[in-house]
Image: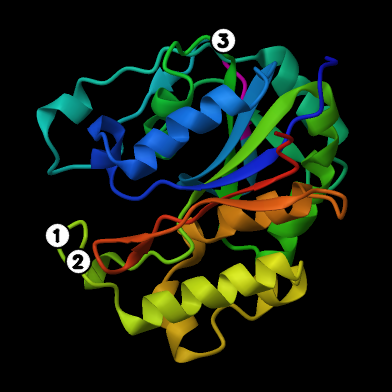
């Protein structure tokens, strides 16, 4: 696998309804898809695949997973029929020294943390898509170090996307999408922004839940950890850009960022 060096992205995916919405956020996703050179493959670390150990999808035709309930039927009708890439999965497994990554041939597929983003960025679904699971028992440093080992994929034309939300508290949501954000949500979103700009990966990996704003913004780390893979896969030479900023439903940060996206 060889191709043009790819950027690495963190996408705040928010509610599944964004998959069928036309709003400034989804419009920006569509623009991003046009701005990035077409990848050879896409590796997505989604907040919605949590596992014992680290796994990567390795099937030829990953299924579309509708891992939510209580939403409009139109969402359950969506299929994202992108192919998989067993060759890319094997390459990744071989390239990562520690931890050992296992290949999943049938358990998972493409969940909404991935397809709700990609159906805007790449609506043709003609690029191979793989997912890497989150080993939730491991601390932040584990996810950063695994991201560092994935960095070489960028030189092979693989677009790495972390899909989650920096602020993600479903218990505190307000049902209006444009509801006034909580002060703590704004505080933690801005704290994270500043640490990202300063490339303070240590604080982002270890200190995100040290105060009230962090603890209530990240009640569980599943939507936060994908950011750590992106930070690990980034390099000092990468230009950092915030591709979208905003908070939906008062407690969900939609912040999206890129490292190394050349315009």
Residue drawn at 31 percent across, 68 percent down: 251
Q: Of the numbered discs in the image, which one, if any, rests on residue 176? A: 1
Mark toward the start of the polypeptide (2 vs 3): 3
Residue 53 lies within the magenta run: no
Residue furthest bottom in the image:
211
Q: Residues within 10 Å of mark 1 (few under 14, many from 20)?
A: few
Horizontal arrangement in the rendering, residue 42 relative to residue 182 (left or right)? right
Q: Where in the figure is residue 56, as x and y percent of width and height?
A: 63, 32
Residue drawn at 24 percent across, 31 percent down: 20
Q: Of the numbered discs in the image, which one, if any, rests on residue 53? A: none
Which of the 4 image quarters holds residue 183? bottom left
Residue receiving disc 2? 179
Compared to 74, does 68 lie above or below?
below
Query: Which span is picked out in magenta?
Result: 56-60
Residue drawn at 50 percent across, 65 percent down: 221
Q: Secondary structure at mark 1?
A: loop
Q: Where in the figure is residue 204, as x and y percent of width and height?
A: 66, 71
Instruction: Report the front residue among 99 and 147.
Output: 147
Q: Secondary structure at mark 3?
A: loop
Label 1–label 3 contact, CB within 8 A? no
Q: Where in the figure is residue 110, as x and y percent of width and height?
A: 45, 27
Residue receiving disc 3? 60
Horizontal arrangement in the rendering, residue 156 relative to residue 113 (left or right)? right
Label 2–label 1 contact, CB within 8 A? yes
Which of the 4 image quarters holds residue 48? top left
Which of the 4 image quarters holds residue 220? bottom left
Residue 163 appears in the figure = yes
> Which part of the image, by quadrant, shows the C terminus?
top right
Residue 108 appears in the figure = no
The CA span between labels 2 and 3 is 42 Å
């Amino acid at each position: 696998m060889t191709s043009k060096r790819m950027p690495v992205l963190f996408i705040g995916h928010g509610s599944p309804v964004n998959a069928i919405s036309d709003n400034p956020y989804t419009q920006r996703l569509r623009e991003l898809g046009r701005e990035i050179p077409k990848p050879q493959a896409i590796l997505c670390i989604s907040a919605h695949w949590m596992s014992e150990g680290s796994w990567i999808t390795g099937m030829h035709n990953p299924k579309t997973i509708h891992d939510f309930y209580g939403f409009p039927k139109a969402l359950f009708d969506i299929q994202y029929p992108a192919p998989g890439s067993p060759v890319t999965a094997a390459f990744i497994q071989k390239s990562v020294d520690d931890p050992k990554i296992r290949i999943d041939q049938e358990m998972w597929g493409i969940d909404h943390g991935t397809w709700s983003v990609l159906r805007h960025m790449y609506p043709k679904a003609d690029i191979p898509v793989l997912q890497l699971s989150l080993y939730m028992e491991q601390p932040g440093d584990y996810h950063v170090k695994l991201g560092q080992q994935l960095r070489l994929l960028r030189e092979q034309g693989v677009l790495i996307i972390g899909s989650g939300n920096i602020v993600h508290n479903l218990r505190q949501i307000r049902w209006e999408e444009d509801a006034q954000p909580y002060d703590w949500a704004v505080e933690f979103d801005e704290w994270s922004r500043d640490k990202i700009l300063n490339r303070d990966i240590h604080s982002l990996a270890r200190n995100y839940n040290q105060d009230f704003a962090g603890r209530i913004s990240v009640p569980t780390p599943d939507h936060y950890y994908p950011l750590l893979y992106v930070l690990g896969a980034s390099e000092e030479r990468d230009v950092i850009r915030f591709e979208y900023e905003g908070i939906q439903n008062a407690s969900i940060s939609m912040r999206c960022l890129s490292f190394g996206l050349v315009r």
